[in-house]
Image (cartoon, coloured by chain):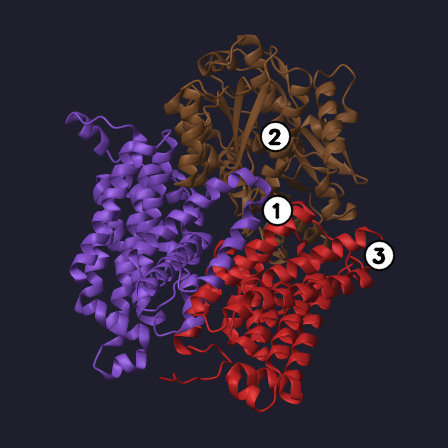
């Protein structure tokens, strides 16, 4: 029992990391139909800027706020400089633009921050919490709680606020959205700022667990992408559940089968899910327009 | 095409004697993983080489000749490394090559270097690089096998007979895992749990729980580098596992203690080089002046702690300088010849004595078993 | 008219490949040329899949990995000649593409992206983890193709670099010839029809699933052969060949040059292969510039270099 519980905790910790990254994909995808492969770099920037601001003497919460604000600004710049000019381009072109952006940000981070691995102290100390023979770090609870909070906030945003609906309307039909008076440029700017901000927030929460360096972004983006697709792209519920499930699959496979093939198992599950549900677990069916 | 023209024109001019170049007389090439998954190893190597060449030229070079370093970043990719090795030899016309941070990159470079008969000093761990001996290939790091042997010797002294293994799936971790499994029998030790993790994993408590629950396990060994071993060490403390934890030389740097945290790293043992314990070395120790000078210069210049890996590059360069000085020539064949005659050269990793049959020139005594106490390194022996 | 443009493309290609060595200042340029040709061959496969049929793959490096490791393993374990190992790799890749392609090609856009990504990662993982067979992340040696020695026996003594430049160049011309023929075949027309609209293609009687699968299998074979050539040329191979970044590289090369055109694929492969070699001058800034180039080309020359340039020419001519 304690063994199962420990695997569960491990899976939740890892899953929370994936879910936080996956949630970041959601808004940009909803607003523009773009899967932003530079999302992982936002997570890296969140952690990295916090590390350096904290090292410069700022208190941790302030350092984190600066990191989130700065990353949000970078997100807006990415939209204005790279995504907006390529509006209407095919999916594969957009994939390459965002991968190009990811390489660019990584290259810049390598110059500015160097190649060392960094971390900063956990928010509530390093003493684990014991539950029936298993343990979990308090920082894991912060990450899980953070993921849940972002999920609830996004869900409320998209279903209960006019702004959130405006985002969905923009994604659905940009021209129609403009015709009903939505400022679609503002919606796009807002979406990128929010997505980047969520990414940076994720970076702040997970860096005490995973540590950070200039090149962690791509790996995180791939796992977050996989989690988001598993749940169904664009749906906060899907991103949250998909990320957590992916983490749990990995931990359970590592615990009960083979740690060597835990990622393989995760991808096999994703392939299987997509086979039966081509839109992911919570994705909506869409029909092709001719 | 443009590239072709820009190099063709100057080359033609030189051939015609129209352009006189103030070229350096000794050209040393390097292909290193300054970026990519092995950047954690390659970055200090590249920095070390740049620093040492600068230092050497300021002091007047070798035998009065200036040294030029041609450094390429292969990103740890074997295919790229082969291209850069070809470029170093055919286009830059270097007299010797240092590099190959990863084993894959080293294997690619050595094939090219052997074809062209240019001496190559590898910075990677695998024993395959120098065994069987190839005429032009040398290496500075201990083999992974030696690290395993050193650790198992220490375990044997403490009557540990059953251990758990948790290894990174990166090249470094996987290679050492295989070597350790290969030699473990010679020490009467049995591996009762064999787990792995991906270098980017966030949590290893699942694997460690499995190891803890394996019957009779008395100690845990973690081959790997980068942040993985730091997370393993933290998770080890989180689970309050009360068994000795051994790390590999892959984390032999002050940075490890910092990342894992002083508390979690307490009591961790690993085979390290003299570099980590410069202050603790006896005054008569031949390595002490070398190690202290390198550590002081590197940390002053780059403001980051030295690592074993930068030390490999330091030693590779020292070997070359020694060989060229003794040979009195920078012809590849002469350098190769002189490298086989290296005798009692004190480096940061150990004291090198090469022969025609031994292109590594280190033995187990070069490793020191270290233990972390109160956030600092101590020598166990 | 169209026939001549196909032949013109091939003749120009062959002439460029044959003439370029006269300008090479050192043997290193043969190596770079061979790298470009191998990459261009793999990218020609992507042109068929993405350019003709409109399907995305982020996992084609997996097939390159299969082709590469077939050359490393089959001669040792099955006693096959390395040349036959290339064929074996291609057959395995084709069969695997057939099996995997069936379910995943039902997916669209990003979902197809993640599914193909998953496939590529699975292959890379097997190559990394099955140490007993593949020697893991450290890589494995690959036997010599032996053709160079045969040529030497016939009195044609080429250096290693020269041989591989010529051999991969010939392979590329053959690969391009097949792709160009396919473009004008009934299958090619069907592929391009579904690139326009799958639903519309379906209504005019094209078996959409079958045609997509054909494109996927053919492109897998291209990637596999390119992987084999990489392995044989380097005489050494590591699992990096099947890595995600290699998949992205292939797609980027294709799109950069112009995803619907074979000359575009070759130009894209040429530029992205040369770029890192040129950027070594900037050392630290290499990644930064690479990312920037990818973004700029995609933003300003959205159709890729070759179609954008052609349009400009035609625009002026008319």
Snapshot quadrant of residue A216: bottom right
Query: Can residue C235 be seen by looking at this rendering?
Result: no
* Label 3 sits on residue: A58
Which shade of the palette goes to chain A? Answer: red
Q: Is A232 or B94 nearer to us in this picture? A: B94
User: Can residue C125 be seen from the camera position used here?
Assistant: yes
Instruction: State the SS at label 2.
Output: helix
On the image, the x and y values in percent for residue A177 come to: 56, 87
Which residue is denoted by mark 2 in the rendering? B150
Q: Nearer the viewer, mark 1 or mark 3?
A: 3
Provide the letter of the chain coloured brown: B
Q: Chain of mark 3?
A: A
Q: Which residue is mark 1?
A: B217
Quick one: which chain is purple? C
User: Disc 2 sits on a residue from what chain?
Assistant: B
Residue C43 location (% of width, % of height): 34, 54
Q: Position of residue C60 (x, y in %)?
A: 37, 57
For image coordinates 59% across by 61% down, the residue present is A40
């Amino acid at each position: 029992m304690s063994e199962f519980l420990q695997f569960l905790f491990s899976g939740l910790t890892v899953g929370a990391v994936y879910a936080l990254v996956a949630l970041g994909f959601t808004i940009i995808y909803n607003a523009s139909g773009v899967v932003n492969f530079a999302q992982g770099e936002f997570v890296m920037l969140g952690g990295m800027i916090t590390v350096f601001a904290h090292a410069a003497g700022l208190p941790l919460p302030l350092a984190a706020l600066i990191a989130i604000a700065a990353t949000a600004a970078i997100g807006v710049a990415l939209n204005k400089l790279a995504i907006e000019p390529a509006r209407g381009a095919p999916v594969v072109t957009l994939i390459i633009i965002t991968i190009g952006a990811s390489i660019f940000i990584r290259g810049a981070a390598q110059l500015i921050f160097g190649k060392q691995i960094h971390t900063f102290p956990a928010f509530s100390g390093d003493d684990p919490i014991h539950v029936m023979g298993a343990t979990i770090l308090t920082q894991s609870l912060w990450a899980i709680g953070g993921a849940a909070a972002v999920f609830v906030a996004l869900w409320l945003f998209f279903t209960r606020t006019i702004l959130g609906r405006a985002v969905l309307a923009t994604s659905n039909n940009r021209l129609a959205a403009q015709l009903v008076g939505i400022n679609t440029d503002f919606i796009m700017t807002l979406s990128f700022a929010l997505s980047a901000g969520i990414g940076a927030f994720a970076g702040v929460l997970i860096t005490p667990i995973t540590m950070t360096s200039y090149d962690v972004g791509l790996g995180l983006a791939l796992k977050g992408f996989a989690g988001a697709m598993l749940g169904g792209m664009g749906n906060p519920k899907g991103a949250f559940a998909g990320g957590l499930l992916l983490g749990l699959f990995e931990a359970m496979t590592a615990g009960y089968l083979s740690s060597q093939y835990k990622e393989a198992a995760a991808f096999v599950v994703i392939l299987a899910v997509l086979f039966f549900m081509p839109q992911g677990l919570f994705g909506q069916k869409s029909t092709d327009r001719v | 095409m443009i590239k072709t023209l820009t190099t063709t024109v100057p080359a033609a001019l030189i051939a015609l004697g129209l352009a006189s170049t103030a070229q350096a007389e000794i050209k040393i090439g390097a292909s290193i993983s300054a970026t990519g998954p092995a950047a954690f190893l390659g970055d200090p190597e590249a920095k070390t080489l740049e620093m040492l060449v600068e230092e050497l030229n300021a002091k007047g070079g070798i035998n009065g000749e200036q040294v030029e370093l041609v450094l390429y970043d292969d990103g740890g990719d074997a295919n790229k490394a082969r291209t850069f090795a070809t470029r170093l030899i055919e286009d830059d016309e270097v007299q010797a090559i240092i590099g190959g941070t990863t084993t894959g990159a080293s294997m690619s470079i050595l094939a090219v270097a052997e074809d062209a008969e240019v001496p190559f000093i590898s910075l990677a761990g695998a024993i395959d690089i120098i065994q069987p001996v190839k005429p032009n290939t040398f290496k500075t790091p201990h083999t992974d096998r030696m690290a395993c042997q050193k650790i198992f010797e220490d375990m044997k002294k403490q009557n540990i007979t059953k251990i758990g293994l948790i290894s990174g799936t990166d090249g470094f971790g996987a290679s050492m895992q295989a070597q350790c499994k290969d030699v473990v029998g010679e020490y009467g030790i049995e591996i009762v749990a064999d787990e792995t993790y991906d270098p980017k994993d966030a949590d290893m408590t699942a694997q460690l729980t499995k190891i803890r629950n394996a019957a009779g396990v008395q100690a845990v060994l973690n081959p790997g580098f980068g942040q993985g071993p730091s997370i393993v060490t933290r998770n080890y403390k989180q689970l309050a596992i009360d068994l000795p934890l051994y790390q590999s030389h892959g984390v032999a740097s002050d940075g490890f203690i910092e990342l894992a945290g002083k508390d979690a790293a307490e009591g961790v043992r690993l085979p390290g080089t003299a570099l980590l314990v410069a202050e603790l070395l006896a005054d008569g120790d031949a390595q002490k002046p070398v190690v202290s000078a390198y550590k002081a210069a590197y940390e002053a210049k780059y403001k980051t702690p030295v690592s074993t890996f930068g030390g490999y590059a330091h030693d590779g360069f020292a070997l070359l300088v020694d060989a060229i000085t003794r040979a009195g020539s920078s012809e590849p064949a002469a350098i190769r010849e002189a490298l086989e005659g290296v005798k009692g050269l004190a480096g940061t990793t150990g004291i090198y004595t090469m022969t025609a049959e031994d292109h590594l020139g280190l033995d187990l005594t070069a490793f020191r078993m270290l233990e972390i106490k109160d956030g600092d390194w101590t020598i166990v022996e | 008219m169209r026939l001549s443009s196909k032949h013109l493309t091939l003749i120009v290609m062959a002439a460029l490949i044959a003439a370029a060595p006269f300008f090479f200042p050192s043997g290193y340029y043969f190596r770079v040329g061979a790298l470009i040709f191998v990459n261009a061959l793999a990218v020609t496969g992507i042109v068929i899949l993405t350019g003709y049929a409109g399907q995305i793959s982020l996992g084609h490096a997996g097939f390159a990995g299969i082709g590469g490791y077939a050359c490393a393993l089959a001669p040792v374990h099955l006693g096959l000649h390395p040349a036959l190992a290339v064929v074996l790799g291609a057959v395995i890749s084709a069969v695997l593409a057939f099996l995997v392609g069936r379910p995943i090609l039902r997916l669209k856009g990003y979902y197809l992206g993640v599914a193909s990504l998953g496939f590529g990662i699975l292959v890379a993982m097997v190559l990394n983890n099955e140490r007993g067979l593949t020697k893991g992340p450290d890589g494995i040696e690959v036997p010599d193709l032996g053709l160079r020695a045969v040529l030497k026996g016939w009195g044609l003594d080429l250096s290693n670099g020269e041989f591989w430049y010529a051999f991969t160049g010939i392979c590329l011309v053959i690969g391009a010839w097949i792709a160009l023929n396919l473009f004008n075949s009934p299958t090619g027309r069907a592929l391009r029809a579904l690139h326009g609209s799958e639903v519309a293609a379906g209504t005019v009687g094209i078996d959409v699933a079958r045609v997509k699968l054909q494109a996927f299998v053919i492109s897998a074979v291209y990637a596999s052969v390119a992987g084999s050539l990489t392995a044989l040329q380097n005489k050494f191979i590591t699992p990096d060949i099947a890595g995600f970044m290699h998949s992205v590289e292939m797609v980027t090369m294709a799109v950069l040059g112009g995803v619907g055109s074979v000359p575009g694929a070759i130009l894209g492969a040429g530029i992205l292969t040369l770029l890192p070699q040129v950027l070594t001058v900037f050392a630290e800034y290499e990644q930064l510039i690479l990312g920037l180039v990818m973004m700029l080309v995609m933003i300003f020359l959205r159709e890729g270099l070759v179609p954008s340039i052609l349009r400009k020419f035609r625009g002026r001519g008319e």
